[in-house]
Image (tube, helix red, strand yellow):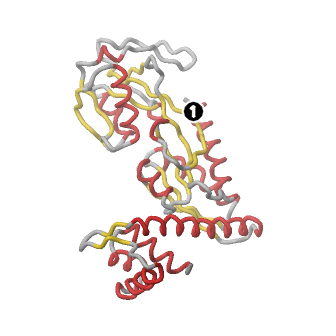
Amino acid sequence: MDLKQIEYILKIAEEKNVSRAAMKLFISQSALNQQLLKLEKELGAPLFYRTRHNWELTEIGELYVQGAREIMLTKKNTYHRIADVLDRSQRSFSLGMPGGRGIAMFTSIYPRFLQMHPNVSISPLEIGSYDMQNMIANGNLNLGFITIGPREKTNINYIHICSEEFYAALPSSHPIARPIKSREKEYPQLDLRLLKDESFVLMYQKSSCRAVTDSIFQEAGFSPNILFETSSAAGIPSFVSSGICCAIIPKCYTKNMDGISLFSLPSHPYWDLDFCYARQSYVSQPLKTFIELSKDYWKSYYQDQ
């Protein structure tokens, strides 16, 4: 197989359009189409169902792309192994992460990482958890830092960092709320059904956080009255502290809870903070270093809470 030709076909499959793929590859559409036709003639079968706006893989195309991704992964793994042995290669990796906590973690540990690996750069990309998993599976991302419920994981590899509990957040002025007498950083337990008539602010529907909170309400046996849906988990406490609604929030966002009372839930719902990477993918030494620095960061973060 011609590695350049493989790269071309994978880009068409990713973009689902030959003209967009040509633009991303910085070659002409006619040149890219010629390569595709040459390969299809060699294989004796079309790789794509062609329409004006969308190209989908045929059964043969699916087989080719699966093998092509394995070949490119083998090449990538081999190069990273060699670079680890030489320990002097200039390298660059892509890292997917959520906004908010991901950015805070990255900016905290990256200077230390560069001291340890001055010839290695990591390019952060702000991506939702579900898209991140797809990009990892398709070989379009080296590593992902992900926040996700155990039921939402897919057929890729995960390195567990820690688990994070979710809490009910109520305005301190709410009749149910009482002064919190904290014992070893624990919170009083609340039957969520007591809030079935209250309004809630929630994360947007396609977020991994929303998947966890939806399961919490399902377990409680009611659908919440939704006042507002947001893409910013960090902004949710401001809605609660204003006194206009309640929320379910992960532990990361329970700092500086002025005007908010927190309660644990009977089942102690949680999600995982993990790093993820493609199956059969080699985790290079620089990425192992970054993961270890991240573990130290989160250990320190939660000790301070």
The N terminus appears in which quarter of the rendering?
Answer: bottom right
Q: Residue at x 34, y 77 (%)?
A: 18
Q: Is residue 162 left or right of residue 24?
A: right
Q: Which quadrant of the structure image shows residue 28?
A: bottom left
Query: Mark 1, residues whose alpha carbon is within 10 Å: few (<14), some, or many (≥20)?
Result: few
In this figure, which residue is indicated by the disc labeled 1? Answer: 302
* Residue 130: percent from left, percent from top: 42, 48
Work out whether residue 71 or residue 239 is closer to the camera in this orientation and state it. 71
- Secondary element type, mark 1: helix
Residue at the extreme front: 44
* Residue 235: percent from left, percent from top: 35, 39
Work out whether residue 253 or residue 276 is closer to the camera in this orientation and state it. 276
- Residue 122 vs 106, above or below: the answer is below
- Residue type marked 1: Tyr
* Residue 167: percent from left, percent from top: 43, 25
Q: Residue at x 73, y 64 (%)?
A: 84
